[in-house]
């Protein structure tokens, strides 16, 4: 039987990526009792993921160090599955927590967008960030041949990291055309440090050709990946490789945002300049307010952390920096917009929903996400539509507009516990 | 713009689908009007348990008749309908409930339904995950389970093959005197109209007494082989029969995917479809009292639905006294999936003036007009 | 020089760097974590706990997302790929 821990905090932060860490640290420095809740075993989210190999990112070290020295209560390995005003229910492997809060900061980050194509379900076809996460989690890639594909700045970062780990990055296939990437690079002229960073990343993966207007159309192999076929409009090329790391940039994790009734416009959570959502006492920072990368996430996290702790003075001091970084958002959207060919790669029998093995043609015949779920079972599996639903938004224009608890699969005993009064086993903020 | 059909059916849930199928088979031109998408109402939320019930002769008659229709149809059903004759075990916790098991068994057997009393050991053998000690149970082998939206789609596809038209995204504002007025202002006319709008049927025919009765369901990840039969507590009928208040009853179904479908809860007078933690908690607590292992199973989805419920627990199937063109086919509460096929047949008999296979009096909508003073 | 840990995947001993996730242990040995509902072999996709493709049984607990579980010495991993 799960034990139920009830704890109260001034500020609860969900998501321990850069935005969440920054928010928690600043709120705590401003005098609030803060909880930082994250599903992963250690803080850092995706981009600052540590693991078997230590992170080299100095900024990450800086913030993680501040976090460990702060009085923030870190609840790692903990998944929030139910939220309402003033309280959250979260499950970890051996316990259930009811977390009471005055202010809530949603820093739930983003996940990669996966688009179906023939062979995409083969073992060793992963996301770009996906392969990177596994390498950081101990997967050796020394001597392995990797094709990196998809779209977005992440591809360069992944190429650099894998090259350093000894992988043979055969090529980087970016679906965006060269002209758009140049235009993006020009907008980055306002952020010379970003251009330098991009150049450095490119240098670290310099042996790998960077092919624009190129995308994977099929993956081949028996029980695992053996080769990838890529297209650049004019010709098809088949490349033998060990891993295909393919992701089409990012989609924000909006499940909690929607579940709490916060307004979402154009796929992003609406926030004020102080990061407040349309629901009072609920803030949002980082990718869910608009995919814009690390720098803005850290600024928004700090603004939210200060604001939630009532330290408006410090929050306002960061507004100008935030505004500056925010210019990247629309530039990124334009640069890495998905070309229409990507919607035509799936064949009728290509799977769209991997949890339930629902084919593209079985899902497509419906008029909405809800109808498709009910009739084809697409999205009814444990990922709750996180993979197929995001793809369906691009492929068919369906919005996954509702969000019902549990927003993450949890033990049935946890579902039972959210409706009964919690045992006040612990009632204080701060570390256990 | 008026198009004519012989019959207009409002509601593409399983009852509307079954009615369309029967009427199309009989050669009538049928148009089905659905506001959202097929099975968007109770059919899409339902458990899909095809069960014979003994709480009254009328309920037995309708469920038993309908079950024989499902038996005749089941070989034609495509795989997506997931038809499984897993049987039902009514579970007894004490001697009082075992006495009820005895009564139930005699009732079924006297009417040709195969039923077998299970002692505690046989119950353990049949369902090892049920907690012990329990007093025993009643095994009804002829009961089955299906995936309702797929069944409704199958019936609609058959109807369409026979010439019916299905119009989704079409809201009907009024339905009377041979005319359906749509939300866009247009009208359709037909010789006969059928209100099969489930939880919305009272809006369409003010005067019928059908109240939505909210239920919650949970589905787990795949745990194949843990439960073999649909398991229902004997207290289920008490819960189904109460005319007020909230209640829960143990009711678990094994799906062919290996997932477990967990019910059941009943609430009146709730309009929103949000998941409510308090009653969900009671339902799960009840579940763990019978199947403790489920506490550690992964629950991947929770949803709610609204059963269309009538005051006397029997559906409304037949002509509406005030309007010679209008027929009602709703109010099936928790037995809509089971009795859909029978409803289709009975509605068809009414419309064609043919002799029905079972007596129709208990389900006539006119009974509501006689008993009520005024609502 | 990082430590090496030994776990079991489907009964066979597998060495992984300390701090590795169970997903890595599976990828290094049998290569697939699970069979899909139509019997296809599946391995990790997202690496971050959202796709559920990496589910395995760990120390008797089924449906564990192996990319979210850090290996411990003598961990018993059963992958049905």
Image (tube, helix red, strand yellow):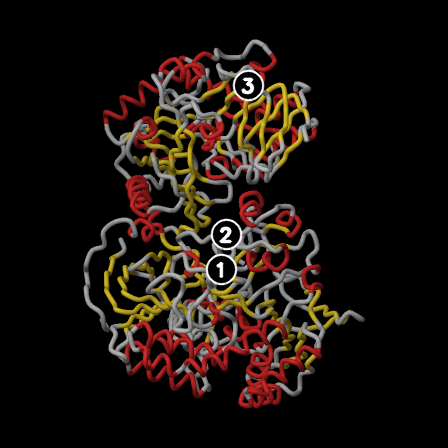
Occupied quadrant, residue B4: top right
**Is A399 displayed left or right of C75 in the figure?**
right
Task: Mark 1 and mark 2 in contact? Answer it, CB < 8 Å.
Answer: yes
As helix, strand or loop, the secondary structure at mark 2 comes to loop
Task: Mark 2 and mark 3 in contact? Answer it, CB < 8 Å.
Answer: no
Residue drawn at x 27%, y 30% is B135
Chain designation of label 2 = A
Q: Which residue is mark 3?
A: B347
Vertical placement of residue B235 versus A213, above or below: above
Q: Which residue is mark 2?
A: A381
Q: Is residue B142 visible to the viewer in this orientation of the structure?
A: no
- Indicate which label's residue lies in the foreground, 3 or 1: 3
**Is B77 displayed left or right of B240 in the figure?**
right
Percent position (x, y) of residue A395? Answer: 64, 57
Q: Which residue is mark 1?
A: C52
Report crowding for label 1: few under 14, some 14 to 19, many 20 or more residues within 10 A (C-alpha): many
Percent position (x, y) of residue A106? Answer: 39, 67
Chain designation of label 3 = B
Task: Mark 3 and mark 1 in contact? Answer it, CB < 8 Å.
Answer: no
Percent position (x, y) of residue A240? Answer: 70, 73
Q: Is residue B31 visible to the viewer in this orientation of the structure?
A: yes
């Amino acid at each position: 039987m799960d034990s139920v821990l009830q704890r109260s905090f001034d500020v609860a932060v969900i998501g321990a990526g850069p935005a969440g860490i920054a928010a928690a640290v600043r709120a705590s420095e401003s005098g609030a009792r803060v909880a930082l809740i994250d599903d992963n075993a250690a803080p850092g989210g995706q981009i600052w993921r540590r693991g078997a190999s230590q992170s080299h990112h100095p900024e990450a070290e800086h913030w993680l160090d501040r976090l460990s020295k702060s009085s923030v209560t870190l609840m790692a390995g903990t998944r929030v599955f139910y939220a309402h005003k003033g309280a959250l229910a979260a499950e970890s492997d051996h316990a259930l927590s009811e977390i009471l809060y005055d202010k809530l900061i949603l820093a739930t980050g983003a996940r990669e967008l996966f688009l179906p194509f023939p062979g995409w379900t083969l073992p060793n076809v992963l996301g770009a960030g996906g392969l990177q996460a596994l390498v950081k989690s101990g997967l050796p890639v020394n001597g392995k041949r990797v094709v990196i594909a998809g779209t977005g700045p992440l591809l360069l970062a992944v190429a650099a990291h894998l090259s350093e780990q000894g992988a043979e990055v055969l090529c980087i296939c970016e679906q965006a055309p060269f002209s758009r990437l140049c235009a993006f690079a020009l907008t980055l002229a306002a952020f010379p440090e970003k251009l330098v960073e991009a150049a450095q990343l490119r240098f670290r993966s310099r042996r790998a050709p960077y092919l624009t207007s190129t995308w994977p159309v099929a993956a081949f192999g028996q029980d695992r990946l053996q080769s990838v076929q890529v297209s650049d409009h004019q010709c098809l090329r088949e490349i033998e490789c060990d891993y295909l790391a393919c992701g089409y940039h990012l989609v924000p994790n909006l499940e909690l945002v929607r579940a709490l009734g916060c307004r979402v416009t154009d796929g992003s959570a609406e926030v004020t300049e102080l990061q407040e959502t349309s629901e009072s006492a609920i803030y949002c920072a980082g990718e869910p307010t608009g995919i814009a990368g690390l720098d803005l996430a850290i600024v928004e996290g700090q603004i939210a952390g200060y604001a939630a702790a009532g330290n408006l003075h410090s929050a306002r001091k960061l507004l100008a920096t935030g505004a500056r970084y925010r210019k990247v958002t629309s530039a990124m959207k334009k640069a890495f917009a998905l070309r229409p060919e990507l919607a035509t790669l799936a064949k009728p029998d290509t799977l769209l929903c991997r949890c339930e093995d629902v084919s593209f043609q079985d899902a497509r015949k419906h008029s909405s996400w809800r109808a498709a779920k009910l009739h084809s079972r697409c999205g009814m599996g444990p990922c709750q539509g996180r993979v197929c639903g995001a793809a369906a938004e691009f492929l068919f224009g369906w919005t996954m507009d509702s969000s019902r608890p549990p927003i993450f699969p949890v033990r049935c005993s946890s579902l039972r516990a959210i409706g009964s009064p919690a045992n006040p086993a612990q009632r204080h903020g701060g570390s256990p | 713009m008026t198009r004519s059909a012989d019959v207009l059916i409002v509601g593409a849930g399983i009852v509307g689908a079954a009615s369309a199928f029967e009427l199309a088979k009989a050669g009538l031109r049928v148009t089905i009007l659905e506001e959202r998408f097929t099975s968007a109402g109770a059919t899409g939320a339902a458990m899909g348990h095809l069960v014979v019930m003994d709480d009254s002769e009328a309920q037995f008659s309708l469920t038993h008749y309908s079950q024989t229709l499902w038996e005749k149809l089941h070989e034609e059903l495509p795989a997506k309908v997931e038809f499984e004759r897993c049987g039902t075990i009514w579970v007894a916790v004490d001697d009082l409930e075992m006495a009820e098991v005895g009564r139930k068994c005699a009732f079924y057997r006297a009417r040709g339904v195969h039923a077998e009393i299970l002692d505690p050991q046989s119950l353990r053998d049949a369902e090892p995950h049920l907690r012990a000690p329990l007093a025993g149970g009643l095994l009804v082998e002829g009961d089955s389970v299906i995936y309702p939206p797929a069944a409704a789609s199958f019936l609609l596809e058959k109807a369409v093959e026979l010439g019916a038209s299905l119009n989704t995204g079409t809201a009907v504002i009024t339905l009377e005197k041979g005319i359906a007025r749509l939300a866009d202002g247009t009208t359709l006319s037909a010789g006969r109209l059928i209100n099969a709008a489930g939880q919305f049927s009272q809006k369409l025919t003010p005067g019928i007494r059908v109240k939505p009765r909210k239920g919650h369901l949970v589905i787990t990840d795949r745990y194949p082989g843990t439960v073999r039969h649909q398991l229902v507590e004997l207290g289920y009928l008490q819960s189904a029969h109460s005319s007020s208040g909230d209640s829960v009853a143990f009711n678990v179904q094994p799906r062919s995917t290996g997932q477990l479908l967990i019910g059941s809860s009943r609430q009146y007078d709730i309009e929103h479809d949000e998941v409510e933690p308090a009653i969900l908690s009671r339902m799960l607590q009840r579940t763990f009292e019978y199947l403790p292992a489920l506490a550690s199973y992964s629950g991947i989805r929770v949803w709610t639905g609204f059963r269309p419920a009538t005051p006397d627990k029997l559906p409304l199937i037949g002509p509406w006294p005030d309007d010679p063109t209008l027929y009602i086919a709703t109010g099936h509460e928790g037995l809509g999936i089971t009795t859909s096929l029978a409803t289709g047949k009975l509605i068809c008999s009414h419309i064609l003036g043919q002799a029905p296979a079972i007596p129709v009096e208990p389900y006539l909508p006119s009974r509501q007009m006689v008993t009520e003073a005024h609502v | 020089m990082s430590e090496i840990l030994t776990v079991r995947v489907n009964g066979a001993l597998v060495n992984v760097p300390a701090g590795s996730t169970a997903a890595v242990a599976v990828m290094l040995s049998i290569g697939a974590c699970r069979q899909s509902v139509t019997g296809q072999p599946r391995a990790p996709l997202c690496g971050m706990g959202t796709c559920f493709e990496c589910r395995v049984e760990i120390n008797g607990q089924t449906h564990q997302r192996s990319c979210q579980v850090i290996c411990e010495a003598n961990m018993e991993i059963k992958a049905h790929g």
